[in-house]
Image (spheres, rainbow, N blue to C red):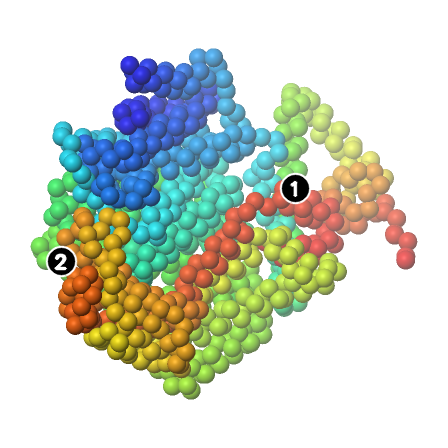
Amino acid sequence: MIVLGELALWIALPVAIWGMVLAFVGGRHRRGDLVLSAERSIYAVFALLGIASAGIVAAFLGDRYEYLYVASYSNRALDTFYKASGLWAGQRGSLLFWAVLLAFFSAVAVFTNRRKNREFMPYVAGVLLTIITFFIVVLLFADVNPFEQLGFTPADGQGLNPQLQNYWMTIHPPTLYLGFTAFAVPFAFAMSALLSGRVDSRWIVVTRRWTLLSWFFLSNGIIFGMRWAYEELGWGGYWFWDPVENASLLPWLTATAFLHSVMIQEKRGMLKVWNMALVTLTFMLTIFATFLTRSGLIESVHSFAQETKIALIFLGFLALIVAVSVVLIIHRYPQLRSESEIQSFFSRESAFLFNNLILLAVAFAVIWGILLPLLSEGLTGEAIQVGAPFFNRVNLPMGMVLLALVGIGPVIAWRRASKRNLAKNFTIPLLVGVTVVGVFAIRGSRHWMSLITFGISAFVMTVILVEFFKGTRARSRIEGEGIPRAFVHLVARNRRRWGGYIVHVGIVMIFTAFAGNAFNVEVIQTLEPGQSITLASPLGHDYTLTYEGLSSSRGRNMVWQAVALMSLDRDGRRVGSITTEKRMYETSPSPMTEVGIHSTPFEDVYIILANAEDLIAGAYENDPSAQRATFEFQINLLVSWLWYGGLMLTFGSLIAIWPSQGPLPAEKQTAARPEAVPATVGAD
Amino acid sequence: MVLIVGAALLTGGVILFILLPVIRGGRASLERSEDELTESEAKKRVSLLALRDVEYDFATGKLDEGDYKDLKREISREALSALREVEAEGDRRLRRAKGSADEEAGGIEAEIAAVREGLRRGTTCHTCGHSNADGSRFCAGCGAQLPGAVEPAPG
């Protein structure tokens, strides 16, 4: 199986190149037979890369430590679950995993379009195969072949980093990669539109669901990463503006901009070049993110310099994408002119454009934050640290403006809105927002950034609720339907609009969670068994935590495990118990911390076992005098809202992605009976 | 041995699978299929959707009555020109199918005659020139009431 996998990887290269060449030639010379062969190459490459991936998984499950990659990321005692996920544990496997996911989506794209959108498909197949070829070349020729053998067989592997032995870390990378690779499809359609000359909005309509799918995976991937950081890294937060996190955020920012700006092109025939640029930029950032996190560049420029081969191939590929897309856009420029102009500053178009500019500004600030330390280290040998303060100072205000736009956009009419109407529509939401800020301020809170964020969140939520209410009422009145029925039809008839609003609710919840951070409580305290500590929650009640003692346990793949038990009382009533641990893994030189979390809808009690006098004596010899330990106690406000917001976002995107039934029912009706137009209220 | 056979089967299978279309002349279609929107149809669809947006924005109080009427007129004009484009495109396609230039000239004559006849019978729209089916009360092209239409009975 493993040898067959390696062989399949080698066969995949000529097949992909064959398909790539035939797709372009067949498209250019209108040869259906060549195009069919190219499309079959995509299926074949997917099967071959699938066999290669299965080979790697088999090597992990079979403890084949003669393979360098397996020896580096697994050991015999490792849980089977984590062995099976070894495919994406390290750089080499991840690159193969990327390639196989891309081949999978390519195959799906070709299959679902086997009878439609045919004028795009030759070049779509060509572009997708070019990207796949690139990844196979990297795998085979950049010293990162996952099938590379050591030449001897070690008795055991080096094991997986204990911090990665966490459920969230197992599903976080695949989710992110699904988002990265799915975006190759809209990019391929965009390039195909440029190559074939059909540059109207068709490619956007065709790829709308692909873009949403990619965005959905990217968002979830990022949130899963936050969940992992919160549970596993043990510092009480979930986002550190770490380069790896930033790398995943970048394509999300530009994809979000793209999702919004394509609507302007669809409706108004504007921003055609801008959309081409955004789709290219987003695709490049997915490649860049993979490159950044999987090339060793982030750790240091110097360690990176030893891997010049892979860096040169990646940078070369990125340069090729820029060059090709710029040339194509210039070539088609006369057809990409705007069909109309923004009529008024007070219009939804202009709100969308503003949202685009801010998203891009955030993206550039983040890129700058990633590149500055690398550039300075490369040029002066001294790395300038760009940390959380920089990112927060630059991005928080922009984030708040973006959040406000989430509320402003839906209420402004397309083309032009009158100021009188704006005043009418914004009065209630603004009042709600100001009231929220006022109530918090009167109750003595002085975290202004957070208060304003709460105020904007309340404003946006009110806008969205009013939108749902008005839409339902209008539909109920016009169609004569009951309220529940009108509501269901309202959403079902225009999933993109109303699904989008539900996603916005999720975004508001996530921002509220961010703002909750300012109210967190943190205390460090050394306790002996039986002693307790009382923390005052900002929500007005007291938590009492009693240290019950240290005990021992021994999980799989561990040398020892010391478990501290705390009982938790809220205002004198027992509400539960929390454990926090130190673990010594067989394959790690120093002990790892497992935090204890007691989660409620509005706050988390979060405990870190920071240090203990003598963990082993305390835990294993049950010696109370040795059980004195230092804990870090935190009350983290509104963290749950981040996860619930993520669920809301998932729910909303699924509504938007879900296929709608057939063509727009209104289309024929409207043409035949314009007096029936109001029947379709709520359609987008 | 098993390995060699497996490898041979894999390689052979893949080569056969991707080469067959070229050898045996299988084809993938490269043309837009009939039921897909053309550029002008897409444009028409967009302006019809815009018309509904305006209705929606007005119904939910985002537009003043004055702005609503202006915009509606403006978008109706856009929709109409898109409709004409779609029709022109359809005619062109039809004529291409018919063939020679001779027939084309004859086709135009015939078309003019048909429009005249339609105007007399009240099935051709006075507003946009669209030819409607017999017995139509409203124009399928622009929605105007047709002269031949009988007013619906009250009640």
Question: Label 1 is placed on what type of residue?
Answer: Arg
Question: Label 2 is placed on what type of residue?
Answer: Ala
Whole-percent x, y for residue A310 in the image: 20, 38
Nearer the observer, A4 or A272: A4
Q: Residues within 10 Å of mark 1 (few under 14, many from 20)?
A: some
Q: Are marks 1 and 2 in contact (CB under 8 Å)?
A: no
Whole-percent x, y for residue A640 in the image: 41, 65
**Residue located beneath label 1 in the image:** B84
Quadrant of the snapshot with the C terminus of chain A: bottom right
Residue located at (44% from left, 69% from top): A601
**A300 with respect to B21 (left or right):** left
Nearer the observer, A559 or A145: A559
Q: Residues within 10 Å of mark 2 (few under 14, many from 20)?
A: some
Check the residue under mark 2 and report the chain it is in: A
**Residue located beneath label 2 in the image:** A383
From this view, report whether residue A357 is shown above or below residue A671: below
* Residue B75 visible in the picture: no
Residue located at (64% from left, 36% from top): B88
Nearer the observer, A223 or B119: A223
Q: How many marks?
A: 2
Nearer the observer, A200 or A169: A169
Q: Secondary structure at mark 2?
A: loop
Whole-percent x, y for residue B82 in the image: 62, 44
Do marks 1 and 2 share a chain? Answer: no
Residue located at (32% from left, 56% from top): A228
Q: Secondary structure at mark 1?
A: helix
Nearer to us of marks 1 and 2 is: 2
Whole-percent x, y for residue A475 in the image: 68, 60
Label 1, label 2: how far apart the Cα atoms are? 64 Å
* Residue A83 visible in the picture: yes
